[in-house]
Amino acid sequence: MALVTRAEDTAKALADSIAPKPARAISPPPASATSTAVKDGESGSALLSALGLVPVTVDELARRCHLSSVVVAAMLLNLELAGRVERHPGQRVSLISR
């Protein structure tokens, strides 16, 4: 970078640093991402069918659905935010009766 001696030099340096960069083309998601979304939908329905009004532990849900505890916890969080499940003491969850 050159020595700045005039106000125009500063303005040019700033203009060059904040100039918009060309947009990159967005490529479609790979086929594996689509199959993962389908699998997530199947996992979600399996989780909902494993849940009931009686509280059950997160680990038991993971065993019933053949999913990791991390995946089940994330899915339960989404269901909780949607108002479909409630948490109980001892890491247990149940469907909310409507």
Image (cartoon, rainbow, N blue to C red):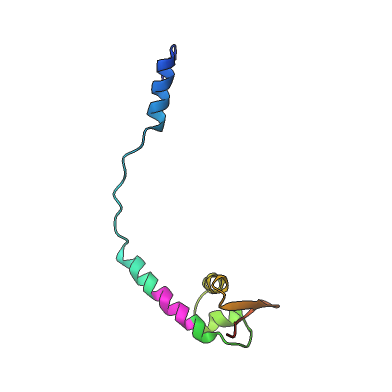
Rendered location of residue 79, percent (x, y) = 54, 74
Which quadrant is home to the N terminus? top left
Write the residue at 44% across / 11% down: 5
Instruction: Judge by depth and name the residue closer to the eye, 5 or 96.
Output: 96
Instruction: Judge by depth and name the residue closer to the eye, 34 or 82.
Output: 82
Q: Is residue 71 magenta?
A: no
Which residue is at the far right?
Answer: 89
- Residue 70 falls in image quadrant: bottom right
Which residue is at the far top?
Answer: 5
Q: Does residue 17 appear in this view?
A: yes
* Secondary structure, magenta segment, majority class: helix
Rendered location of residue 2, percent (x, y) = 41, 16
Q: Is residue 44 magenta?
A: yes
Q: Does residue 2 appear in this view?
A: no
89 displayed left or right of 17: right
Number of numbered discs: 0
Rendered location of residue 67, percent (x, y) = 50, 77
Which quadrant is home to the C terminus? bottom right
Question: Does residue 17 sit above or below 82 in this rendering?
Answer: above
Write the residue at 42% across / 76% down: 41
- Residue 36 falls in image quadrant: bottom left
Which residue is at the far front?
Answer: 98
19 displayed left or right of 81: left
- Residue 45 falls in image quadrant: bottom left
Question: Does residue 55 sit above or below 81 in this rendering?
Answer: below
Write the residue at 45% across / 78% down: 43
Q: What range of the chain is rendered magenta?
A: 39-46
Question: Does residue 37 sit above or below 15 in this rendering?
Answer: below
Write the residue at 34% across / 38% down: 21
